[in-house]
Amino acid sequence: MKKFIVLTLFISSLLGSAVEIEKGIYKTILKALFPTKKVIKVWSDDPSKKDLFESIPGIKVVNEKKIADILMLFNTLNVQRNSNQMIFANGYLILQRNKGVVVGGFYWQKGRPNLIFIKNRLEKVGIVLPTNLQKYIEDIK
Amino acid sequence: MRILSLFYIIFIATLLAFIAFLYISIEEFEKKIIKNIQNVILTNTSYFADNIISTIKKEVGNKNLYEALKNNPQLRSKLESKIQMVVTTSFRYIYMLYRDKNGRYRYLLDGSLSDKGFFDSKLDVNVKEWDKVYVTKKTNVFFQSGIDNLWITTLKPYIVNDEIQGVLAIDFSTQLLDNFSKILNPIKEMFLYIFLAIIFLFSIVLYQIVIHLKTKKEIIIDPLTRTYNRIFLRDKIEKLDVYDYDLAMLDLDHFKKINDTFGHKAGDLILENFAMLVKRNLRDKDFIIRFGGEEFLILLYKGKNKNINSKKILERIKKAVEEYDFIYEGKTLKITVSIGLVKDLYKYANIKEAIKIADKRLYDAKYSGRNIIIDYDISYDALPKNNQIDIEKVKLAIDNNRVICHFQPIVNLDTKKVIKYEALVRIIDENGNLIYPNSFLDSIEGTNIYRDMTKKLLEIVLNKIRTKNVSISINLNLSDLIDNSIYKILYDELSQNKIYAKFLTIELLEYEKALNKQLLSKRIDEIKSFGVKIALDDFGSGYSNFSIFEVFPIDIIKIDGSLIKNIDVSNTSYGIVEAIVKLAINLKMDIIGEFIHNEVVFSRLKELKLKYGQGYYLGKPLETI
């Protein structure tokens, strides 16, 4: 019983810390992409991420793609672009397959968090990233 | 108890140290094992890394690795397949990155089975550690923390023509470490639980000791004054080296008056503040003990230092008490303290004897006008006589109601009828033996116990008068009437038993020094105003002084037994008795002859027209009337 409690607490703390890291990264990404917006409307294809985004101040999760400022993709491998909405990949494969569409991607690889912003997509939407994020810009054709 | 506690503490501390040692040993053992595992891993990793780099070099030759792989996906696939053969659950990720012109690390090859990266795509790594390889051109090994299940990462440079074209990374997982921990953790946990159990046990023992000490302290502390009590004194006496201390007995002057006037709360306040004042003037090694109601005992430490002046300390206390304003309900009350001091305790058989002397000196301080310290050199008379029982036993007898009176009849020699009784005090010891006054009166004379004994005697006698409706005489010293406290007891008892006072006769011992004749005369008049008769005891012996009849209103003369007992054989005794009888008749006083022990004596006294007498011939002292 004690072991179970200790294990549960340990896992909870690990998950808790992973969630906090992820939350911090998404906060940085979204504030960098929308520096002037007071409320950023986010749509996600993964309902389980709703709580994560809603816990970030200044972020509002919307159910309709049309009204969203950015689409966060976790599960959609092949993205079809219908509007000028910003799209962000949250998986390595999603990013690799949709380099021409997404503005960037965030994913975990080999236990390490990886962040990429795609240069020409940023230029297209006229976003200039803050200095601390410049090193994550990739010139991918 | 203290030794047992010490034993427990040492035992548990040893046990704790032993368990801690075992626990630390296991920790050390674990560290050593891990170190060995690391060495094995690093040896294997180095071997794998050398083989992989050798394999790549075989395929690529001296060509630029990036260029060779960029243009040849088949080669990439072939090399990655070869690398994959080495990948296990422990050697989790094996991949090769290169550093681009922007300092970012990108994939050349990735033999990993999962989380596989594409050629030339970026991987965010620990740049600091990876850059070290480019700087040193040597293998770099570092430990991961906070990265999913990774433990050790080995980075080996791929060098061609002294140029680093890539870095081979082998990530070793924590799986082996986890398996090892799974084996060791139960043992460590077991020791931890034992350790915690002992800590718990230790805490309980400590708690018990603290409770014990606290309770022990509470038992020996007087709750009102927070000074020690008599239990402490009793326990301390056994352990105390009396030679290291001077001893003082303190008593608040007129304390009863404060209690009677302002109530017990005021009395309590004074006691509290008095104790505080005394403590403020004492040193760490001194002790203050509440000995009785308003009586305190102080043990003043001097050790081997003969220069310590205990009297100075007591002077300081006396002055502090005298100058202190005791504020009770807005009223300022003043009080003083009388002190009896005993130094050089080695002169006494034990501390109890010293306490008795201090008590006597305190009594003398009271007698001499209060608010003073008496510390005069001990005289032989002040020491207890050999046949005297312990003063504590007398006090105990009073406290435990073991004081009784025997009553000897005083008879009309003409009618042989009993006209009154003389009360003779006795105490019963713990074993039920009767103790006569010659075994304790000298011992308690001049102490507060004597005062308590007088009070007890009066209570017994007045109660007997009340219940038996008879006249009874008691013996007092003339000095008892000078003593304020004894006189007050007498006066109070008579005031409360006015209707029975006329049945009481006080026999005064005439050889006592009358220090203040004016006061004595006044007080005898006051006593007589209740109807009490005054007899002059043992007249004709000692320092008989006829002038006493001019000063004090005497009703009865009691001729000393030493004259009476020889009246049948000594003409001198006969002549003296005859003269005393004539004196009494002339002064219109009643006269009683003591020690009538046979018929001849009885007959001779009758010839002399002696009216009353007492003695074994007429009646022995008995407990009942």
Image (cartoon, rainbow, N blue to C red):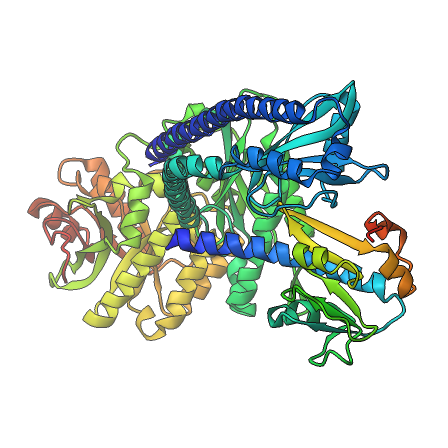
Image spot of residue B8 (x, y percent):
35, 34
Image spot of residue B410 (x, y percent):
19, 57
Image spot of residue B453 (x, y percent):
33, 52
Whether residue B186 is situated above or below residue B241 in the rendered picture: below
Whether residue B76 is situated above or below residue A12 in the rendered picture: above
Residue found 74% across the figure and 45% down from its top:
B122
Q: Nearer the viewer, residue B470 or B441?
A: B441
Is residue B423 rendered to the left or right of residue B527?
left
Q: Which quadrant of the view contains residue B76?
A: top right
Whether residue B496 is situated above or below residue B325 in the rendered picture: below
Which of the image's four quarters has the C terminus of chain B?
bottom left
Which of the image's four quarters has the N terminus of chain B?
top left
Q: Which quadrant of the view contains residue B73?
A: top right
Is residue B417 rendered to the left or right of residue B6?
left
Q: Nearer the viewer, residue B544 or A118?
A: A118
Residue found 26% across the figure and 61% down from its top:
B460
Q: Is residue A140 visible?
A: yes
Residue found 46% across the figure and 52% down from its top:
A7
Image spot of residue B74 (x, y percent):
65, 39
Q: How many marks?
A: 0
Q: Is residue B370 visible?
A: no
